[in-house]
């Protein structure tokens, strides 16, 4: 049995299912990211895993033991193997040292055991100078580091992190992320992290679960999630801006032709003629040219630029080619090609760059 | 006007010369009210915590009742204690009526609702995230309760200070159950009441100034606490 197992877990509050029918298995030592928009139920799921709340229905096994059916004492023992850094970490109205020491104290650690451990952690999170300072006077980034130090002080088998860098300025956020990377490298803890920042999930985790509207829509490696999203919602959340409604008109040797409102796209898929699908094309997989260029790419459409918007070093180009497409090119390319609203371009992408998802038609 | 001015001057003289009667009355007032406050806090803080932490049927009603009797008139508490400890009352056999002990008991009862109510609201004021944080770091139920009490410590200290202020400044209860016996149960407020009716404005004013000074100190302590 996996280290953490959730079977059909639902948590209902005030007549609403905050998370529903969650089935998830997490192995020991894994770094797992729960991604999803705000309000998707990520915090609720972490609270259930930390045994702070109990599921309304379903089973939760922690290291092979049914954590719902067990005694209060056993649950406390389980919870002591887990540490949770809350989304808005609260520090106790006492010194930074005492804040970091509290978890160890509650587990009965002696003063001799506490001092070196807390000092090491203060050093690790770069707050040695603040050891005697009241933690309430720290900045947001410093509080987050205290919260992380406090959690890893107890050497948890499972570390839960809820939006560890949300609400932080970019400098503090990258510092906290570096700290997490260090923890991942130095401890054997199973880490479960909730984030709405999909790229952070991709950077830190080995496996990702996409939670939307209380449902776990897809679980897989970051490559799986980002390259082969299983539904329109997941595709849109992971940044696939081009999700095109279509119907398969032919399938020859897994090369399908999809009718997108009168225009035809070729893709690789098993779907058969007549099936309603979404054709997903990542904006970065689209090449733009001013003239039709002969190439091996199976899809090339002429269209008119609707809008060009600069995003950092990149330009996001919206094109109308009978259907809407968004392409991402470098700002430099856009400038050199003179891309601007009203200009005609060719948008080209490979059949292998199209990911096809079945579309429910009801 | 001249009489008032003269009275004030004399009152200050009584204070600065440490007049034995003024000092004795002040000392008794303080010792009775401090004892009553500490003992009441000893009972009320744990009971308030239990009411806050444990869910039981009628909990909301209990809290509403406590808040209702915040400003119970001192004479009503005085009457209750008098009936309890009078010779024919259920506790009359203890012979405590008109002793400092019964004054302490009366003041304990008088300030209990304030201490209980403000303890409960102080604990309720601690954010839920604090108890979640403690639990998530492996605190047991009692360890979590202790964390919450520690976080609410300034609110609880303010409650105790307010309770003391109410105890030392009340007059009805002290008069009814203490009897205002000179050298035994006479306290600042009962002395002011008696001396004023006798026309001894100087002593009344001196005690009045001391009472105001005590109120001022309490106020200073409270504002210091609330700033934290």
Image: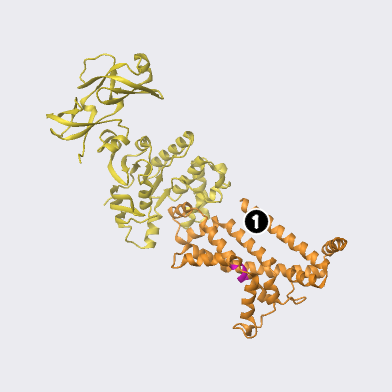
Q: Where does the image place residue A131, in percent across and percent down from the top left?
A: 56, 46
Q: Is residue B94 magenta?
A: no
Q: Where does the image place residue A207, in percent across and percent down from the top left?
A: 31, 40
Q: What residue lies at 71% left-to-right and 58% top-to-bottom?
A: B217
Report the quarter where the C terminus of chain A lies.
top left
Which chain shows up in orange? B
Picture quarter containing residue B44?
bottom right
Q: Where does the image place residue B43, in percent across and percent down from the top left?
A: 57, 69
Q: Is residue B109 magenta?
A: yes
The foreground one among B189 and B160 is B189
Q: Is A294 situated left or right of B63 in this image?
A: left
Picture quarter containing residue A34?
top left
The foreground one among A153 and A319 is A319
Subunit bearing disc 1: B
Q: Is B193 situated left or right of B109 in this image?
A: right
Of helix, strand and loop, which mostly describes the magenta segment? helix
Q: Is B70 situated left or right of A69 in this image?
A: right
The foreground one among A97 and A256 is A256
Q: Residues within 10 Å of mark 1 (few under 14, many from 20)?
A: some
Q: What residue lies at 34% left-to-right and 17% top-to-bottom?
A: A339
Q: Which residues are magenta?
A: B108-112
Tell me the SS state at disc 1: helix
Question: What colour is chain A?
Answer: yellow
Q: Is A225 situated left or right of A252 in this image?
A: right
Q: Which residue is mark 1?
A: B222
């Amino acid at each position: 049995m996996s280290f953490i197992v959730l079977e059909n877990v639902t948590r209902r509050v005030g007549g609403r299912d905050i998370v529903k029918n969650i089935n998830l298995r997490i192995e020991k030592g894994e770094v797992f990211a729960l991604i999803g928009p705000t309000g998707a139920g990520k915090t609720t799921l972490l609270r259930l895993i930390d045994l702070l709340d109990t599921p309304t229905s379903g089973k939760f096994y922690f290291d092979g033991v049914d954590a719902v059916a067990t005694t209060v004492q056993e649950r406390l023992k389980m919870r002591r193997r887990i540490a949770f850094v809350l989304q808005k970490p609260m520090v106790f109205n006492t010194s930074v040292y005492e804040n970091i020491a509290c978890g160890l104290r509650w587990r009965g650690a002696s003063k001799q055991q506490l001092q070196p451990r807390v000092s090491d952690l203060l050093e690790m999170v770069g707050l040695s100078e603040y050891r005697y300072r009241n933690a309430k006077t720290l900045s947001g980034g410093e509080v987050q580091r205290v919260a992380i130090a406090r959690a890893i002080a107890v050497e948890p088998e499972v570390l839960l992190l809820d939006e560890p860098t949300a609400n932080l300025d970019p400098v503090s956020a990258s510092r906290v992320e570096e700290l997490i990377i260090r923890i991942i490298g130095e401890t054997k803890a199973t880490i479960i992290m909730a984030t709405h920042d999909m790229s952070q999930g991709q950077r830190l985790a080995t496996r990702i679960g996409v939670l939307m509207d209380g449902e776990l829509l897809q679980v897989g490696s970051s490559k799986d999630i980002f390259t082969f999203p299983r539904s329109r919602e997941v595709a849109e959340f992971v940044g696939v801006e081009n999700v095109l409604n279509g119907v398969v008109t032919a399938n020859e040797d897994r090369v399908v032709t999809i009718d997108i409102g009168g225009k035809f796209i070729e893709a690789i898929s098993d779907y058969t003629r007549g099936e309603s699908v979404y054709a997903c094309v990542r904006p970065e997989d689209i090449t733009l040219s001013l003239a039709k260029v002969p190439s091996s790419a199976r899809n090339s459409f002429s269209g008119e630029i609707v809008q060009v918007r600069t995003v950092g070093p990149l330009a996001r180009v919206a094109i109308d080619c009978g259907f809407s497409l968004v392409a991402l090119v470098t700002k430099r390319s856009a400038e050199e090609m003179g891309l601007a609203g009203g200009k005609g371009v060719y948008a080209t992408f490979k059949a292998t760059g199209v990911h096809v998802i079945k579309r429910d038609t009801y | 006007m001249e009489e008032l001015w003269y009275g004030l001057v004399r009152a200050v003289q009584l204070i600065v010369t440490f007049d034995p009667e003024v000092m004795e009355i002040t000392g008794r007032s303080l010792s009775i009210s401090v004892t009553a406050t500490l003992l009441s806090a000893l009972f009320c803080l744990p009971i308030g915590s239990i009411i806050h932490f444990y869910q039981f049927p009628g909990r909301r009603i209990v809290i509403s009742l406590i808040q209702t009797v915040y400003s119970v008139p001192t004479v009503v508490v005085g009457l209750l204690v008098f009936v309890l400890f009078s010779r024919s009352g259920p506790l009359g056999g203890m012979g405590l009526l008109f002793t400092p002990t019964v004054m302490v008991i009366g003041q304990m009862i008088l300030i209990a609702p304030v201490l209980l109510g403000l303890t409960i609201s102080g604990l309720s004021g601690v954010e839920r995230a604090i108890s979640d944080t403690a639990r998530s770091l492996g605190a047991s139920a009692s360890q979590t309760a202790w964390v919450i009490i520690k976080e609410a410590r300034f609110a609880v200290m303010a409650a105790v200070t307010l309770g003391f202020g109410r105890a030392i400044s009340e007059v009805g209860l002290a008069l009814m159950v203490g009897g205002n016996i000179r050298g035994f149960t006479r306290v600042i407020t009962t002395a002011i009441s008696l001396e004023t009716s006798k026309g001894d404005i100087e002593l009344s004013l001196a005690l009045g100034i001391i009472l105001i000074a005590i109120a001022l100190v309490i106020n200073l302590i409270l504002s210091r606490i609330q700033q934290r």
